[in-house]
Amino acid sequence: MTNQLTSLLNIKHPIIQAPMFLVSNVDMVKAAMLCGIAGCIPALNYRTVDELKVAIKELKAAKPKDGAFGFNLIVNKSNVKYKAQLETICELGCDFIITSLGNPEETIISAHKAGIKVFCDVVDLKFAKKVEALGADAIIAVNSKAGGHRGGKSPKDLIEELCENCAIPIISAGGVGCKADIDKMLSYGAAGVSVGSLFIASEESNVTNEYKQACVDYGENDIVMTQRISGTPCTVINTPYVQKIGTQQTWLESVLNKHKSLKKWVKMIRFSIGMNATKNAATKATYKTVWVAGPSIEYTKAILPVKEIIRRLVN
């Protein structure tokens, strides 16, 4: 399965274990690297820079010859930790950074000085061309089948459009639950895939067993979009609690989001409230179950070790 992505990251298989807020951790990424794929963790999974430093050092020590690890950075103003996270990652080093929800220019400049590759999340050609012009090393094409903050185009349409108009590698995010799905994305022109939701119900994940079991019990048709977490539409499992609170912004949020000078602050507050709710649901036994996941949980039939999930993906 050697191609652009395997060469770019020096990995066996063109697969990135996608960064998932509260889910991804060092143990998951170490297991991923040992199986010849890349692993990525959101920097926001660490409360402090010191915790982030410990994670980077542990991953560097565990990295095999044909593995790679990276971190995801939210690069917009809602992430007040961004500057310190970027500085720390560039200081200690990793293989790649994935940027999301903002202008990646500063990240690309700083990371390249440190010898770190930068992949940028995009949902359409407009932003793909922008990040390519800024010097991104690859594009993460977030399609309509992705979990979390997903795009609006089908995997086929998005990959083919980006491949036709961009010169850098395209990595498809969303809609991969088995080997046949990987082959399909590669046939559209993708250099590799980013896979997240399958790994929520892994033994290495430290979210609650209830969250993991929900990924086993629910399926593709149970995924809905909500604006009640980050202010940006996000996919979650349609639990009774989600049905109770609804998936749309409150009337007050809707009004304030139309106010140019207040919009940024409203989004920051909603982001903070939503992240706390998601954290509690993921790490505590609570009836407030806001579990982020994508349609590919359709393929999750049991809680398995990461190596078994990867084995099923590549065989």
Image (cartoon, grey):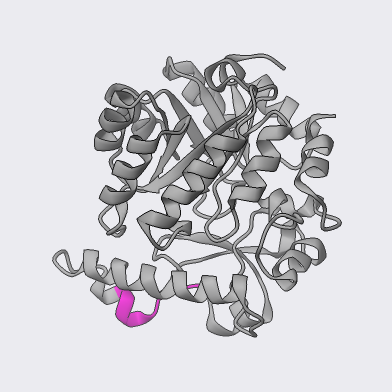
Q: Residue 223's quadrant in the figure?
A: bottom right
Q: Is residue 151 visible?
A: no
Q: Residue at x 69, y 24 (%)?
A: 13
Q: Is residue 77 visible?
A: yes
Q: Is residue 195 above or below residue 262?
A: above
Nearer to me, 283 or 123: 283
- Please give left or right for residue 136 compared with residue 222 in the image: left
Residue 157 screen position, x and y as percent: 56, 31
Nearer to me, 275 or 143: 275
Q: Residue 37's quadrant in the figure?
A: top right
**Residue projecting furthest to the left:** 261
Q: Residue at x 53, y 71 (%)?
A: 278
Question: Is residue 252 in the magenta section?
Answer: yes
The range drawn in magenta is 247-254
Residue 76 screen position, x and y as percent: 29, 51
Q: Residue at x 53, y 32 (%)?
A: 158
- How many marks do you count on the picture? 0
Q: Residue at x 85, y 29 (%)?
A: 315
Q: Is residue 160 above or below residue 63?
A: above
